[in-house]
Image (cartoon, rainbow, N blue to C red):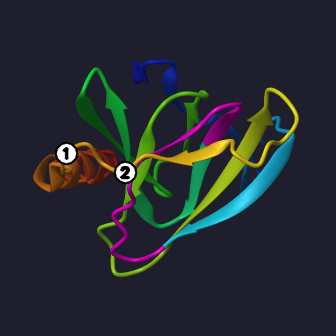
Amino acid sequence: MTKARGVEVRELESIKGGMAQFFTPQASHETMLVQIPAGAEDDLFVHKSQTDQLLVVKGRFVLVILVDKKYQYIPLSEDKPAVVTIPPGVLHGAINFSDKPCVVVNAVLRHRPVQENDYVPRGKPFPYDLNAARAALDDLEGSLTQVA
């Protein structure tokens, strides 16, 4: 779907078994459960040697990436299971407009042994466009409503 500087968003395929729906897990070297607090507006950060593979399991948030001095806003929601892959070297952050935390699984791919300085906070070179970020989330929710 989305592809910018190697960032890719792809919907998960599933199979149904009885009443349960099974989604294919992502291969990883390490799996983390990440909680994005209610009302969070993260600064940007980058990883030098890991690929993040994010899947929202509860709630929703907007992933922000910086490409060519422009922010791109990628909405993610538990209601539309998708994995976003963020390769090393891509500045990214998160916005959670909700009054509830968002829970994300990160299936991390390591490209070399873990190093203490792999996570590098960078801050925001300029403020996020919160209206554009909210509009991206609203568009996602609108597309979900139309399908239902």
- Residue drawn where x is 11% and y is 53% of the image: 131
Total count of labels: 2
What percent of the width, then of the height, locates residue 118?
A: 68, 41
Numbered disc 2: secondary structure: loop
Relative to 57, 76 lies left or right = left
**Closer-to-camera residue (139/113):** 113
In contact (CB < 8 Å): disc 1 and disc 2? no
What label sits on residue 126 in the rendered view? 1
* Residue drawn at x 43%, y 46% as measured from the top left: 122
**Residue 83's quadrant in the figure?**
top right
- In the rendered image, which quarter contains the N terminus? top left
The residues bearing labels 1 and 2 have C-alpha atoms spaced at a distance of 9 Å
Question: Depth check: 35 or 92 in front?
Answer: 92
**Residue at the image point whose x is 20% and y is 55% from the top:** 134
Task: List the residue tagged with mark 2.
Answer: 123
Tell whether 3 sits left or right of 114. Answer: left
Please determine whether, in this image, residue 71 is positioned above or below residue 143.
above
Q: Position of residue 91 (x, y in %)?
A: 44, 36
Amino acid carrying mark 2 in the image: Gly
Q: Is residue 100 above or below residue 97?
A: below
The magenta segment is 37-53
Across and down, in percent, residue 78 comes to: 50, 58
